Image (tube, rainbow, N blue to C red):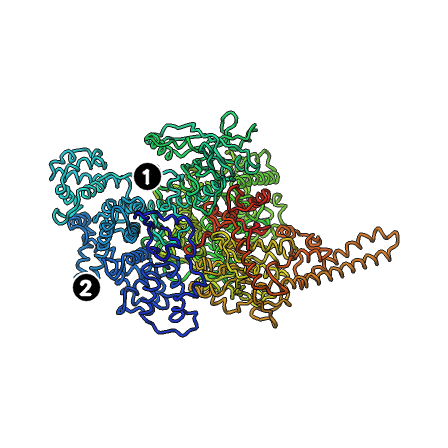
Amino acid sequence: YYITNNLSMDSNVHTGGAKHFPNKDGQNQPDVSKGKRRVGVIPTIQEIHGDVLTTLANQYWAPHSKLPKNKFSEKIIERIYYKEIGHRFPIRRIMLLEFSQYLELYLWPNFNPGRLSPAYIMSIVMIINEKFRQKVPVWKVFRDHPVQVPLFFHAVKEAIKEFNDQFSLKEQTVLLIFLIHCYNSLEEDIVRTHIQHTVSLGIWRCILPSKLQSLLEKNPRLNKRWNNLQKREQKLGARERGLRENDYNFLQKLIHKYFAVLEEIPAEGFITMEEVNFAERFLELCIDLQAQLPTRRFFNTLLLDTHIIVRSAQSTLAHREQEGHLFCELLKMVKFYSKFEIDDLEGNPLTETQMLSQHYDQVLSLQKQCFAHFKELEELALANISQVDSRDSLTGYLRSLNNRRLHELAHHLNLLEPYGEAKHKSSFILEVIVSYHETRMSQMDEINAMPLYPTEEILWDENVVPNEFFSGEGCLALPKLNLQFLTLHDYLLRNFNLFRLETMYEIRQDVEDAVLRLCPFLTSDQSTQFSGWARMALPVAKFTVVEVAKPHVGKNHPSRVRADATINLDIRRNIATEWDSLRKHDVCFLLTIDALSTSPTYSSRKPFLEQVRLRYLRGCEVEGYLDEEGRVVAEGFEKPDYKTRMRTVRLYLDVNQYQFDMEKTIKGSEDVYETFNLIMRRKPKENNFKAVLETIRDMINTECVVPAWLHDIFLGYGDPGEAHYSKMPNKTETIDFNDTFLDAEHLLENFLGMEIKCEAAPEEQIKPFKIHFPEKGAGLEVIPYTLPNPGPYPYNKPKENSVRFTPTQIEAIKAGCNPGLTMVVGPPGTGKTDVAVQVINNIYHNFPNQRTLIVTHSNQALNQLFQKIINLDIDERHLLRLGHGEEGLGTDKDFSKYGRVNYILAHRLELLNEVGRLQKSLGVQGDVTYTCETAGYFNLYQVKSRWDEFMTRLKQKSGSEEGNEASDVKELFPFHVYFSNAPQPIFKGDSYVEDLDQAEGCYRHIQKIFDQLEEFRAFELMRSGLDRANYLLVKEAKIIAMTCTHAALTRRNLVKLGFRYDNILMEESAQILEIETFIPLLLQEPEDGHNRLKRVILIGDHHQLPPVIKNMAFQKYSNMEQSLFTRFIRLGVPAIELDKQGRSRASLANLYNWRYKKLGNLPHVLNSSEYLTSNPGLSFDYQLINVEDFNGVGESEPNPYFYQNLGEAEYVVAVYMYMRLLGYKSEEITILTTYNGQKHLIRDVVKQRCGDNPVFGFPKTITTVDRYQGSQNNYILLSLVRTKTVGHLRDVRRLIVAMSRARLGLYVFARVGIFANCYELTPAFKQLLKHPTELHIYPDERFPTNRKTGDLPPSAKVIKDMPEMSKFVYDYYYQVIEKLTKEQNELNKQKEAVESAAHRFQTPKEAKTIDAPIEEDPEKKKKNLEETLAQPFLAIDDVGTAEDRDDSENSDNEDVVHPIRILPSNFQDVRDEFQPFPHVKYEEEQTEEQSSEAAAATEQSAEMETTQTEQDQPAEDTAGIQETEVDSNKEAGEKDETEAVEEIPDNDAGVDSKPVEDVEMRDEKEKEGDSEEGEEEECGPSLDMMRS
């Protein structure tokens, strides 16, 4: 059911379902094309312009067309629908209509119920379905014109609920898909209003009267509600009552229609897919209705009453192996949710005990009816429940009854209507009774028995793990992550399954890649050997199961299974080293591969299973390598000196999977564990899935407790604002804002319009401030206070905040300090990190005994946040940063666990030395600095006693007639000697109060030493580093930071250690998966059944890119890309949206601020000279530059989904070179693109044009938009690549990221005609098109410039296309070099003249003393002259590679001339390094023949490109689980764009699509490709991609 191009003319593209075709004998065959690539599904720009639909759009509704618009005509709608769309629903045509804004500009504005035809209804519905498929906004047009919405929904329901001659079954399937979307959009008021009655209590009129009566008797409150419903309906008018009655009967009629469709499907022979598709979509609807509590509450009773599950299971479709496979998988999900552990009416989760009690009640009811009415079942009635509740026993007892008696029994049990009203088969009645009363397996038992590793059966089952070509058109047997969940158990279960399947998709890709590289082939004896090699897989020489441990009590599987695998490491040394580096708990995979051919040639373009038979695949976990004596080499010990290259690795096998396999073996199947011939490993950062799955499974098996105030909101129910601090019973009324406000004026700015009370005098109104917020009233009370004197030393002064927060930021900080849920939406550049840091700082000072957990998605973001925390007034002994990536902090201090332990131990010695100095100053004898304990005694008996005596004497003197004098403090102070090294004088003697305050500050300094030593006492008692590290984590640290991946991997250990925290703050929360957000909330055990969390602070931006999902089916169908932050926003949870940006020029901010409510600019953006000055040499601060085809080629695709555009790449690099020649610094320029293929192409062009030329160097970064989220630079050059379709930039979130990365200049290179006409991109491109689409430059202007923003240069040069720009840069470069050559020569002449004059006038005796200074002066003159000469042309001190720049930037000596700052002695050498643009003819125009030859060469080069070279494949994220770039509109024929790990695949022999390259060069590329987590991609030598 993955639609391919050859189906586009007659396919079920909008109805889903597996596709099968009849062969010549009439038997259905599976669609073998679904493993191949979809070609041409997306209409190109040429097809769009030449299509009749485009012509009609231009005549009737297209906004960009300048033609006069014709009047509305219904005939046009019918013509489009019947002639252009027909009943085939070709996806290309529908996409074209949706792209032209058919719904927004023609269908809905002219909607009239009086002329509503089937074509009109279907046209609206198919466009809405297409919008859902493409994940673009849907309901806005309905909200803008809501009047006709009720009539439209009524028409749709009438069209689908019964068989209708006006609508074919395929059309009704399209309507069914529309209903599914509606029931999944309940957050939209305009939708919910019109479908809520179809799932309300009134639908119970359709169930059996006896069952209805039984249910109402059991629930008095529901009975009362039922009676009220009857009374309200009596008051309705006839028309309203009829409409309501139709709504109540709607689902029942749809169910009966479904039954009729099932009955039309034959048991064998030819089958049309329309019935299958309708049945699959109906089951999908049932699943969605059951999976949300508002729709499930009453529908599940109707579903059970109509016996959908039994009827479906006994249908002919369920017994057709090929056509019914997906149908059966969906039916399993329906059955699962029908018996889910929840009270449907109350919505409360049910425990295993309660579910068991319900089951016993049902069986007991059966026994009672049998005892009362069926004497032939007396044995069943009197038997023990455990003897009769199994399927076999129940079937055995009931099989003796005839049809009538079975029917009567079912009627007595309220399962069927009375006998005679309907006739049913005995098999059906028996199944109804048995399925209702049989015992069910516990869901937890099912999860615990499930192997965590994938097997070959599930890995290539595309009903479960779809391939990469899924475009959102079909139906899948996958759970969905929508707004609401039934219970926390349901939430975890869905995420567990999806995360497991997503991991399987990645593993499948790795397996296919490794096996094809190994090139298996059949030998003469029909055994399988390998002629190639792969980095990640090796043949297994021997495999033996060495231990099968006895099961634990109550378990039926072994407690442990271990095996040994022997491999030969007689391979390349670097690869052997990687295999030797396997560590404990690393995950590997054992495979049994059977070659199908004697030929070792394979192609990655062909379906994998057509080339290789993968018989078995099993996962395992490494315990360690064995030494030569057969013992496992312990982790951390030196590896033995092996005599041979053979290695034996001890493995842990999955015990559940081993049990399943052994049960099959006992029944006669092959022993899986005697067949393995291959072992495969994966990259460590991609291979932590097992630990994460174990974490989720642990949470499923334990009682997960979220805070009570968050529980309902988390599941998607109740009042969305219930967890807001204003509604919390324990909200903080008085908050110490510490250093949040810079001064009193700053405070007043943030509370304008509020009544502010302050009892302090004006001169005393200085920071810090406490603010009291009364429970009632709009005013507030400001309480200035003075911080206690911290001590006499300069370092005692606390660090202070310097950010002038805006009112919205202050509200966010206030909310974060209060208990409850705080949501902060941070648009680009609005300072959300500063807000987060200040919230943490305020919590630390307001609640010193509470602990705060900080979680981010990436190491880079965590380091940025942590770096700012370090710079605030937070004691560093309370800071801890967990996980890898800590080395990326911009500090020499180590904040890891062991780094903090070392710091504490070292600081302890420093403090004890201070105690020793204090002891010496007081003249106390003895060794008081031996331990923290002895120091404590010294403080108690010597220090405090002296201080108490000092204070007593001061009080005594104050009580005397003389009173205290200013000199008394100085005379009586007991610690003068100790503070002799402090700035003097400590006591000025001007005021007694001031001197006493200073004395108290000195004593606080002393006491702080002893307080810290008291905290450090525990570290003296513990002897091992592990114990100390754990104590630090659990007790000492107050602020703990980690990534969400680290939280998932270490949850079990953290809970075991007794980790505790009170607050959690998540940055980048809109980029974190739902489950990755949930796990950090539960890193601690509940206390007395309650979660101790007091604050949950989520900071993110749902308008930017979401979490990365590599498989499009999980992203689009299951909505797995939805973050918890985004879900809360959709639910209507109150959020604070920061409204002032300080990153971009105001003109640049206009490109993306339309996406936010009221995003303005901070004052410095409007007033700073940096923002008021134009970009030198460029007429505009932003510009959209149109790039036409180059040599007849626009976008190219040398590999599937590997998009490149050579014309744009050359254009972008030419503009970069031009900017460098003007003097722009290379580290201020970033080149971005929307596709991985273009990124590599640009890197190649930069390397060729600029790589070895110091005049240009490399830009700071060349990467993709997805990868660059969270970063910024002064100048951005953006390539949009596509020339046939918009591509995945149509996702507005990606557009927002692209438009918001630049601070001072943004220059977009694109095919304007494509992007300007896209409806979703209109606001941004309308702004971009205010400037010309041809590049305007002003080469006479140098960097920097005095020209103001908005002032156009007097005579701009207009660049028409890329060849002209390339030629201009080429010529301009030579002009610059020639001028610099002349200046260099002049410099050399001056130097020679100075040296000659010096030698001429010196005497022989003076020669030695004069020579040295004479040599110094020319160098300094030379340096000064270089800088002067460089000013009008280029920044000479900025050229060179990224590594050179780092060295020069770190140089603090201004007199040192860095080697790259010296101009080459012969600039002709530099000139020779610059190669002319090879693709451009400068002297003469290309002939048509030459152009065609160039195009042919381009095509040939593209064909040589290999799929495995740099194909966009999923990779590890910066946080460790998932981070890659995803093409969010893969339905448009695009594949995931990946970033995190870029590796050039090995040149395996036998893979026919891989060009041969030098082995050593390839190894270097592989090393370069493995980028670290969170690293920014710096541009060194780029990957040498073959390109057009």
Residue toward you, 920 or 206? 206
Reply above or below: 1136 against 34. below
Image height of 456 relative to 1254, above or below? above
Residue reaching furthest right? 1404
Q: Which mark is residue 236?
A: 2
Camera-nearest residue between 322 and 1579: 322
Q: Is residue 204 visible?
A: yes
Q: Which residue is pictured at 68% across the width and 58% down the height? A: 1471
The residue that label 1 is drawn on is: 446
Q: Position of residue 1150 (x, y in %)?
A: 48, 65
Q: Observer-nearest residue: 1061 or 1464? A: 1464
Residue 909 vs residue 293: left or right? right
| Residue 310 horizontal/vertical position (percent) | 23, 45
914 vs 5: above or below: above
Please give the label number shown on residue 1357: none
Q: How packed is label 1: few (under 14 Cα within 10 Å), some, or many (20 or more)?
A: few
Quadrant in which residue 120 is drawn: bottom left
Mark 2 / mark 1, whichever is N-terminal: 2
In front here: 1298 or 231?
1298
Query: Residue 705: x, y in percent?
Result: 35, 44
What separation in Å lies between label 2 and label 1 (alpha carbons)? 50 Å
SS at mark 1? helix
Foreground tag (2 vs 1): 1
Q: Quadrant of the C terminus?
A: bottom right
Image location (x, y in percent) of residue 505: 42, 45
Answer left or right for 1425 relative to 875.
right
* Residue 708 visible in the displayed image: no
The kind of residue on which mark 2 rests is Leu
Residue type indicated by callout 1? Glu
